Every structure is written in C-alpha cells, then in structure tokens.
Image (spheres, helix red, strand yellow):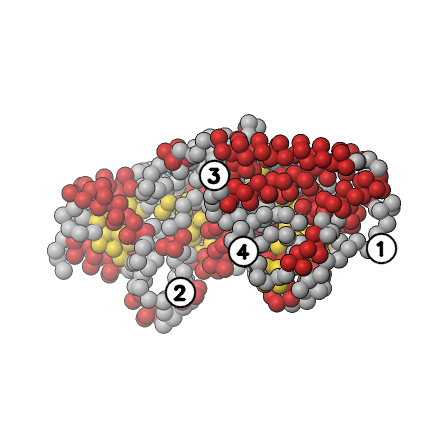
Amino acid sequence: MTTAMIETTRQIQYREALREAMSEEMRADKRVFLLGEEVAEYNGAYKISQGMLDEFGPKRIIDSPISENGFAGLGIAAAMHGLRPIIEFMSWSFSLVAADQILNNAPKMLYMSGGQWGCPIVFRGNDGAGGQLASTHSWCVEGLFANVPGMHMAIPSCPYDAKGLLKTAIRCNDPVFFLESERMLGDKGPVPEEEYTIPFGEAILRAEGDDCTLVSFGRPVNFCIEAMVELAKEEISCDVLDMRTIRPLDIDSIVRSVKKTGRLVVVDQSWPFASPATEVITQVCERAFDYLDHQPVRVNSDDVPTPYAKELEQAYLPHKGKIIEAVKSTLGLV
Amino acid sequence: MTTATASKGRDRKTGASAMLPDDTLLGWLRDLVLIREFEIRTMQAYSNAQIGGFCHVYNGQEAVVVGTFAATIKDDPIITAYRDHGHALARGMDPKACMAEMFGKTTGCAKGKGGSMHMFDRPNNLFGGHGIVSAQTPLGAGLAFATKYENEVLGEGEKRISLCFLGDGALNQGALHEAMNLAGIFSLPVIYIVENNGYSMGTAIHRGTTMSDKLEAKAAAYGIESLTIEDGMDVCAIYDKFKPFADACRRDQKPGFVDLKTYRYQGHSMSDPQKYRSKDEVGSYQELDPILTLKGQLIEDRGCLTEEDFKAMQKEVRAIVREAVKFAENSPSPDPRTELYSDVFTDPLPNSSPSGPYTHGEANHLTRGDA
C-alpha cells in the first residue's frame, strides 16, 4: 500500500492523462501502436487520442472498422509476434462480441503454449454506466471478466492514476484489461510533468480513519470519498482504500485496515453476484474473520439490467447515500 | 456426397515443382509418410487411452501442409485450427514433442498444458493449434499485421506472409469475415487456406455454407484474390498453384484466400461413427492418396525413387514414430506442485489469485531444444 503521490500544481483531465501515457510510451517504444474505432481521423470517439494521428501517423494510430472480435484478435497475435498493441474498445460493453478473443486467447496463450508465447497487450476503454445509456451500453465488465486467470485488471479513479497505471500497463509483458470511465474523462486532477508509473497490486489510502474500512475500485472511489467527508461531520472516520487494480488485489492492505477498524464496506459498480466485492469479502473472511466486529457489507449496482430513466439509473448505481448507510449499518447506527 | 477429383490438365513438366531438385520432392514424400505414420500411432495411442480429450487426425490431408509450406520461408508465421499434428510435423516440430504433448507429458511442445489441439512451436514459427473454430483467423490477420509493421515501421525483417489454415466449417463463423475484412482493408499479407474436406464435423459443406461450390466469392466480397485448388490430394499440384500465388502475396504484401479441396480419411474426431458418408466415397479419395500419388510421380516421371527406396523410407519413418511413442510413454507427467501455477503470467505478481501464487515457468522444451 502507498500514500505517496508526486506533488504538483498542474491539473489535467482524465482523458488527457490517458493520452499522455500512450503518447509517452509510443515515443519511447516504436513497437507500441493504438488501434480501435475512430481513434485516428475522428481524433477519438471521446477525444482521448486527440492529436495522436498527427504525431504518430496512420501506421501507428489505426482506425479499425467496427469488428471488435476481429481487431481484438489481430492485436493478440501482433502481441504474440512481439509488438505492443493498445486496443481501444469505444466501450467495454462492446467487448462482449470479442469475448472469445479477449478471454479465450489473450489470457490463456502463455499457458496453452507451455510458456512459448505471452501476450503483452492492453485492452482499454470506457467501463460502467455512462449516463442514461441503458442496459446494453452500461456494462461493468469487472464482475464478469475478473473471473478469468491470466490477465491484470486496472481501474483508475483519477487522472493521476489513469496515467501512471496506463504506462505500467503498456510496459507490462502480460495482458492488461484497463477499465476507464466515460463519466470521469473530463474530470481534472493533479498530474505531474515528470515521469512516473504506478505498480499493479498496490492500493492507495485516500483517507485515514478508525471506524470502518471502505474499499473500492475506479469511479466509485470518488463516491466513497464524498461519503467519508459527510460521515466525518458525524465524527465517523473511515479508511478509504482505492485498490487501483482488481487483479492483482492488494488484499494485504485491506486486511491491515480491517484489523484496525473491525468493519468493512466494499463499493463496487458491478452487479453483486460473484463480483469483485464478494471476492474481497471472501478473502477478508478467510484472513481476518476474527477481527470483524460486524459482517462485511457490499454496495453494488442493483441486480437488474441497467435502466434508462435518470431516476432509475441513479437509484441503481452505487452513490454517496448508499455508502453512508452501509457504513452506519456496520456501526449499528441504522 | 462429394466426389473425388483427379488431377486434370496439369502439365507436371512445366509446373513450379518440376524445377525443384529430386531431393526436395523426396523430402516432401518423407513428410507425407511421417504424418501418415505418426497419425496411425496417434490413433492407436488414443484407443489405448494414452491420449485424452479431443483428438483430430490428419490422414488424407497431408498434401495440404507439405505443398503449401514448401512455398514459405522459416520466418513466415503459420497458424491453424485443432487438426494440427500435420502442421506441426511438416513445419519441423520434433515428433517426440508432438506425441508427448498429446500424452500430456512435460516434454510435450506445450509441456502437456495444451494437448492435441494446441501445437505451438516457437522455433518454427507455428503459432498454434487453436481449438475454437475460426478463433485463429483474426490471429492470422494479426500475425500478418505484425510482420508488415515490423518491416515498414521498425525496419526489421524481410517481406513475410502468414498462412492461416481453417476448415470449411470455419467459413461460417463471424470471426473469419471480420478477419478477412480487416485483411482486405489493411492489405495484410495473410493467406487464408481453407482445408476444404467437405464436412464440418458431420455436416456436408453445401448444407451449412452458401456458395459452397464457389467459395472464392466470399473472398471477392472482401477484395481478396483467391485461388481454387481442385486436386488438393496431389502435393505437386498444390505447390504448382500455390507457389506463384504466395509469391504475389509476399511481393505485394496483400492477402489471399485459397479453397483447397482435400479429404480426411478418418472421422472428424476419434469418436465419430461417420454415418454421414459412404465407404465408397472414402474409397474414391483413397485412390487419389497423396502418398501414392507423389510416390508414383517420383518413380515414373522422375525415376528418382524405387519401391525398395520407398520401403526403406517407410521403415525409417516408422522407427522415428515408434521412438516418439516410446519417448512420450517414458516422459514424466507434469508435477502439479510446479506446473499447475507456472506459465500463467510472463511476470507473475503477488496477490494475483486467491488460490495460490503464480510462478515463472521453466524454459520450454522446444525452445530449449531438448525434446
């Protein structure tokens, strides 16, 4: 676990942080290329790759037709052959049509080949509810895909982490599923000019407290911080652990915190059944059961298809109010 | 029912194979015999329950790999589906590593982690062996993308082509159509070779595939030039047609599509009762047997082989295959304590799994060269 971030006054958007990570790594290593829908001439469906075509040219910033299964597989074999592909899914929701390639091939290639061919590839794109996109476009794939061995899964909650984790992902010799959030692309945060990377499997402690451990991944970390601020007004203090990666999972930091607070709330934007939240809770029960003063509580999206109507979508997603209620329940206050 | 088509109208004296020395064609014959004899042993071992899982043998189709590989260089990537033993052997994999893999032994090409359907051979640029129908076709496009990128962006390597083999059943998977569109749009030097044996499992091609008598139309839809090889049981006929086609794809760094008509003598897999075709049909193709055809050409046309030479070749190959079986039988099974959790990650990180730490894999037997 870490608490250290490089101090800076420079503020950039989450999307700019992603772009900086890709551009810096592409300057450093000509084997790195970006391929996806609308990444080049359109400058990115969400403007993440804006300007990259101008700098790197069409042989390295490559517009793909809408063929997720095809271009995911293309990237996998390019990685096996020695290149360093970044494959952009406009949304992770669209990765489902590429499931065979990203789940059957990328994470299993090294094993199936008896160690002959690894797959140094990054799949990245928007994950989670984007804002009234309804059921098919609002996937939180972490619940589904984290079940598969053989890949790392990173999920940054802020611009600083978006850049540092993506640079690590691009340099990684194994497949990385990199889950971004459309809702955060315009968020600004401190990102230093100087070079840095963030290691996989090391959580960061966003806030320190004694009463309850809040564990989260990606965008909902920000809701945990909002809840922590509100709870502090009622003199309830929380550790807020931003896991940064789901696989590897920095369970040691979680266990250390739970041993201090005795209470655990896990906030995870995927559905509750067999989710990262249930995995965290299972591992805590295996390793720190005797330290728990209350049963662990999970805050997930509700177990229904993602609705369209604003009121329904808001009710469905994890948010500050649900987290406050969950923390209070562990303290016997509700 | 399909019918066997004999070589017609081809002049063996002017084809590309006619220019090759006797030794090259004798080498082809030896490869054909090696694959045939190897698969006979494979079937025996499967019947003896020494090989598990799914197992698909190559008998009858041997000319496909021998004839097409002859048009490649060693740096050309090769990828195929699950009927892959012939590809492994023709590409140069040690028969011991191939057999040991099926026996699930540590000395197998994938240390016993892949099995019959997953023959990988890095030293020979064989990128598998893939079990999901057509899953290898986007990968084929990616291999071609990589060689072209290396050549054009990194300034590394010469112009290469990638051969991506598929069965006729794979024609109906979306993956192939996405892959061919990408290959067409990006002008990727990949050649999709349909090993058209007439059946996807038990479904005759016309029952599952539109335009089955004119598969080149599918390639045309993606702007890809195609080649149809009717006499795909004849290794020289394959080479004569495929070599100039492959050379053009290499020179122009563009994709190709080949409808290569062949036939499998055995069932789809080892558990296929074959009620969908007649013995007469199988027999009609066995009359065109690739080994007998090439043997006849070498004895009659070239005069570089005698019956005695052929018998000696068979004897030598059978000894190699017997040795491969013995090697597989005597090789150690993988130890779960070291092998279960290795080769999951190139660089294992702590806390990646709740069930145990991942470890570095031992160097592969093929890449280490001691199979």
Read off the chain for label 1: B
Q: In the picture, which quadrant includes the N terminus of chain B?
A: bottom right
- The residue beneath circle 4 is B272
Do residues under tags 3 and 1 come within 8 Å of each other at their CB atoms?
Answer: no
Residue B129 shown left or right of residue B49 in the figure: right
Do residues under tags 3 and 4 come within 8 Å of each other at their CB atoms?
Answer: no
Q: Where is residue A234? Give x, y as percent.
A: 15, 54
Q: Identify whether B43 is placed above or below B203.
A: above
The residue positioned 36% from the left and 47% from the top of the image is A246
Q: Is residue B322 visible?
A: yes
Q: Quadrant of residue A141?
A: bottom left
Nearer the observer, A62 or B192:
B192
Q: Which mark is residue B66?
A: none
Mark 2: few/some/many CA within 10 Å (<14, 14-19, 20+)? some
Read off the chain for label 3: B
Q: Earlier in the sequence, mark 3 or mark 1?
A: 1
- The residue beneath circle 2 is A131
Residue B352 shown left or right of residue B288 in the figure: left
Secondary structure under the numbered disc 3 in the rendered image = loop
